[in-house]
């Protein structure tokens, strides 16, 4: 399988981009904003279709989560969120507000048969 050697966030981001998850998002004032289209999303507009957690090689407290997301307007992309000491607490709270019914692992590249 092509992703078995993907060990770092950038490796997974590249694989997901090849699968059409190309939108970039940033967070501002309790909204996730598509950097290109400027569409704004609340937590109920976001669908997490996969996530990957990472620990730093040299410092286990250097952690991050790569979210693979779709939006209510069918935009697909990735968002990397640091957690632990490097966490963006406001963005982390935003992701906690995403309804559980909007969270799946359906698009996780580690679970999809080629």
Image (cartoon, grey):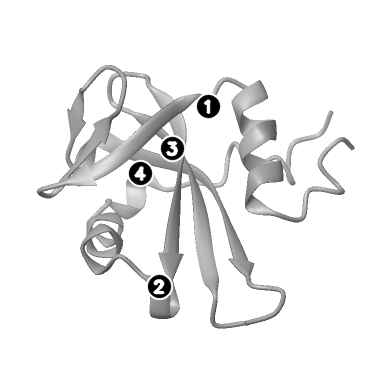
Question: Residue pushed farthest left?
Answer: 29
Cα separation, mark 2 vs mark 3, equals 21 Å
Q: Residue at x 64, y 23 (%)?
A: 19
- Which residue lies under the disc numbered 1? 21
Q: Quadrant of the N terminus?
A: top right
- Which residue lies under the disc numbered 4? 102
Cα separation, mark 3 vs mark 4, equals 10 Å
Q: Examine the image and state in which quarter residue 54 appears.
A: bottom right
Q: What is the number of callouts on the image? A: 4
Q: Evaluate if marks 1 and 3 touch, with contact meaning CB atoms under 8 Å apart.
A: yes
Q: Secondary structure at mark 3?
A: strand
Q: Evaluate if marks 3 and 4 touch, with contact meaning CB atoms under 8 Å apart.
A: no
Report the mark closest to the observer, 3 or 4. 3
Q: Earlier in the sequence, mark 1 or mark 2?
A: 1
Q: Residue at x 42, y 48 (%)?
A: 103
Cα separation, mark 4 vs mark 2, equals 26 Å
- Which label number is shown at residue 69? 3
């Amino acid at each position: 399988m092509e992703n078995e050697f993907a060990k770092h966030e950038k490796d997974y981001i590249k694989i997901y981009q090849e699968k059409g998850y190309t939108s970039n998002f940033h967070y501002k004032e309790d909204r996730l904003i598509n950097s290109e289209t400027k569409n704004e999303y609340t937590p109920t507009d976001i669908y997490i279709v996969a996530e990957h957690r990472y620990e730093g090689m040299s410092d286990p407290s250097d952690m991050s989560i790569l979210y693979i997301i779709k939006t209510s307007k069918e935009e697909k992309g990735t968002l990397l969120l640091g957690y632990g000491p490097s966490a963006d607490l406001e963005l982390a709270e935003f992701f906690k507000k995403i309804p559980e019914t909007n969270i799946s692992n359906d698009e996780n590249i580690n679970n999809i048969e080629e």
